[in-house]
Image (cartoon, rainbow, N blue to C red):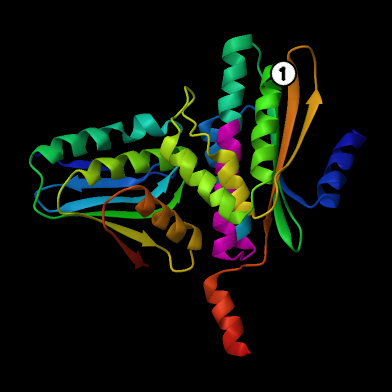
């Protein structure tokens, strides 16, 4: 039974405010979003930060929904995934982990590396290009999720691949949202104080 | 012409498309599981409206959040509105929501239709 205490301690040590492991559906996505929103609201988080965290959570959770369904359909396996959100003084981090077919690793890694190599303006241009020229895939994705997460983050996306077996790899992704509001308004206020 | 009126939910926006009263409005949150399916009735309605459009169409977006799949469909809606003479897009964003302001600016770069920006 000690693992319960260990798990609890790990969550505290890692500053995790929400962890969900299991099946991912749109209904569960909505519940997880509502819980995280309530948590941020009760801590009086700035609305601009709340919106960024919410946006990244949506893309992350809906990605998992799509991948998990994919695997279930094609390989007849039930694939659970993990989603977590943590809070440090200076930032939120949103992490997810889910199994993907081995053959997708190269494609995902390539896309993430490309995104991480772009600066703010480059991401903006790339986003516009994909928005204009891309088409929704068979799962209803626009191919914009990672780009949007990187733009909301303003930092590179961290990712990792752990081989699971001949067919599957565990894909982990972390997006960081700084808690320092850099809105025009706050810059103006700072200037006024000066 | 029939009125398209959808109440908003926690993951889908409120939509009112009413030719006779000159109300064209999409507001709230848009993160449906299947954005293409959700927005199809809107695209169909605009196709029908184009046949007998009003001389002026002020189409209002007042979105709090939208996911990336919805952004693709918003662009589809804007592209259809591009072909309707007398259309203006009124893009509302919360005064401290720079991301939503920027999203509106990016959409306005991608389509040839006038945008007005309003804060709330």
In this picture, residue B51 sits left or right of residue A2: left
Locate the N terminus of chain A by quadrant.
Answer: top right
Q: Nearer the viewer, residue B33 or A168?
A: A168
Do we see residue A32 in this rendering?
no
What residue lies at 46% left-to-right and 37% top-to-bottom? Answer: B69
Q: Quadrant of residue A105?
A: top right
Q: Which residues are magenta?
A: A41-63
Locate the C terminus of chain A by quadrant.
Answer: bottom right
x, y percent for residue A83 = 68, 38
The chain letter for the residue carrying disc 1 is A
Residue bearing mark 1: A102
What residue lies at 35% left-to-right and 54% top-to-bottom? Answer: B108
Vertical comparison of A43 with B64: above or below:
below
In this picture, residue A60 sits left or right of residue A10: left
Q: Secondary structure at mark 1?
A: helix
Is A117 one of the magenta-colored residues?
Answer: no
Considering every residue shown, the one lying at the far right of the view is A2
What residue lies at 61% left-to-right and 82% top-to-bottom? Answer: A190
């Amino acid at each position: 039974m000690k693992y319960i205490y260990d798990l609890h301690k790990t969550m505290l040590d890692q500053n995790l405010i929400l962890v969900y492991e299991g099946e991912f559906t749109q209904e569960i996505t909505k519940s997880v979003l509502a819980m995280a929103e309530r948590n941020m609201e009760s801590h009086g988080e700035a609305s601009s930060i709340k919106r960024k965290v919410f946006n990244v959570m949506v893309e992350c959770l809906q990605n998992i929904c799509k991948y998990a369904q994919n695997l279930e359909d094609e390989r007849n396996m039930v694939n659970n995934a993990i989603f977590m959100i943590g809070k440090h003084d200076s930032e939120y981090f949103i992490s997810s982990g889910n199994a993907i077919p081995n053959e997708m690793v190269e494609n995902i890694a390539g896309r993430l590396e490309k995104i991480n190599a772009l600066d703010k303006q480059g991401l903006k241009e790339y986003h516009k290009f994909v928005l204009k020229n891309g088409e929704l895939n068979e799962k209803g994705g626009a191919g914009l999720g990672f780009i949007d997460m990187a733009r909301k983050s303003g930092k590179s996306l961290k990712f990792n691949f752990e081989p699971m077996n001949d067919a599957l790899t565990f894909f982990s992704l972390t997006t960081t949202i700084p808690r320092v509001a850099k809105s025009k308004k706050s810059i103006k206020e700072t200037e006024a104080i000066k | 012409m029939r009125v398209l009126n959808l109440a908003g939910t926690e993951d889908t926006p409120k939509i009112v498309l009413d030719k006779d009263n000159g109300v064209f409005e999409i507001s709230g949150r848009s993160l449906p599981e299947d954005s293409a399916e959700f927005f199809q009735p809107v695209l169909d309605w605009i196709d029908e409206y184009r046949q007998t459009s009003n001389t002026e169409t002020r189409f209002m977006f007042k979105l709090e959040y939208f996911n990336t799949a919805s952004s693709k469909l918003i662009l589809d809606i804007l592209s259809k509105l591009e072909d309707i003479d007398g259309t203006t897009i009124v893009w509302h964003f919360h005064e401290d929501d720079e991301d939503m302001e920027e999203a509106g600016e990016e959409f306005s770069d991608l389509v040839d239709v006038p945008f007005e920006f309003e804060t709330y």
